[in-house]
Image: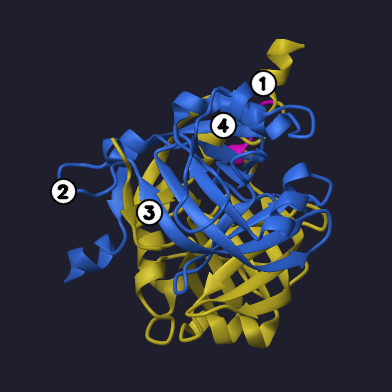
Chain colours: A blue, B yellow
Amino acid sequence: MPKLELSPSEALYPVPVVLVSCGNQDLANIITIAWCGVACSKPPLLTISIRPSRHSNNIIKGSGDFVINIPTQNFLKETDICGTVSGRDKDKFGLCNFTKADPSRVRSPMIKECPVNIECKVTKILSLGIHDMFIGEVVKVHCDISVLDKEGNMDYSKAAPIVYNQGEYWSLGKRIGRYGFSAEKEA
Amino acid sequence: MPKLELSPSEALYPVPVVLVSCGNQDLANIITIAWCGVACSKPPLLTISIRPSRHSNNIIKGSGDFVINIPTQNFLKETDICGTVSGRDKDKFGLCNFTKADPSRVRSPMIKECPVNIECKVTKILSLGIHDMFIGEVVKVHCDISVLDKEGNMDYSKAAPIVYNQGEYWSLGKRIGRYGFSAEKEA
């Protein structure tokens, strides 16, 4: 049976869902972003795409930095709120009862309640269509020990990130393998 | 308790795992990519990042197109193989028993066994460090009806994509919400 041919769309799944915080301690905002990915490992570069009309777009263009905060499933409602409410109308830190934590290398405040915070400095902005893509260099990573295992490695069942599939939030299942396992078996 | 401060790294999770096919019917290759994301919705643009030394990097620079094939968990071993074996040494379609399917708008063959195939034409290549980032415009999407529900929408439990967390392959859990649910509840 042939496949259906569909019109062009972004179509990719699964993708991350992160809370991008920006601004400063006095005037801060949060925007939920799923159009987010890894662009390069060395230097470590991440991309986030934000429509020019969004409040955070102007803030980040002005400040030149942002923080990617990775929420746990416990913050699903807050994640949805930060993606549907505008920071022009509401203080989203207050609305979500999130606490501003001090970053090390940037000015954008971090969200304390997220177990992982990734500080990024903007290195490039590409105007691509209805979204601008910001490329950010990772300058510091913060990690809560509550999401680490006994060896000090990330335990993603504890980190419990939200997975995004084209408009749907999903939970993570279980670990089914490690990169390179096929070669190990053959060796 | 304060968080641990870690050295800069790409750190982002969860991210997709896709099989990028390239070349043509006679000389085709497949590379597994997790550094992949959505850059823009209109036009629909996706990014994939590939080291310059990789076989697929040169092929895509030459051809100007690629296909993002989204594997199911049934193809976990093949996904790992296509990320660890070089196409210079092996025919990965043959090695994985994958079937070349004809694309509509590009030359890169698609992987029939993957339920979703996204044809992309390269619009921009950024040399960012140890990775080049290719921005591809989606020109056609193919979808197997076996991963659709009765209403014709994607059923991600049937699509069963692999989720990638920094070197670990994970399964998808269950649906925990839809975009906009917090606003609906308040309305």
Which residue lies at the image location 50% right of the left edge and 30% below the top edge? Answer: A99
The magenta segment is: B146-150
Report, in whole angstroms, how far the alpha carbon at label 1 lies from the one at label 4. 10 Å
- Front of the two marks 3 and 4: 4
Instruction: Report the side of A8 relative to A107 (left or right).
Output: right
Q: B175 and B116: which one is in front? A: B175
In the rendered image, residue B149, in percent from the top left (x then y), is placed at 64, 29
Q: Sort mark 1 into few (<14), some (14-19) or many (20+) by Cα contacts within 10 Å.
A: some
**Chain of the residue displaying label 1:** B
**Chain of the residue displaying label 4:** A
Q: Sort mark 3 into few (<14), some (14-19) or many (20+) by Cα contacts within 10 Å.
A: many
Q: Are marks 2 and 1 on the same chain?
A: no
Tag 2 residue: A151
Q: A168 and A67: which one is in front? A: A67
Mark 2 belongs to which amino acid? Glu
What mark, if any, has residue B181 been given in the picture? 1
Instruction: Report the side of B108 relative to B45 (left or right).
Output: left
Tag 4 residue: A169
Tag 3 residue: B76
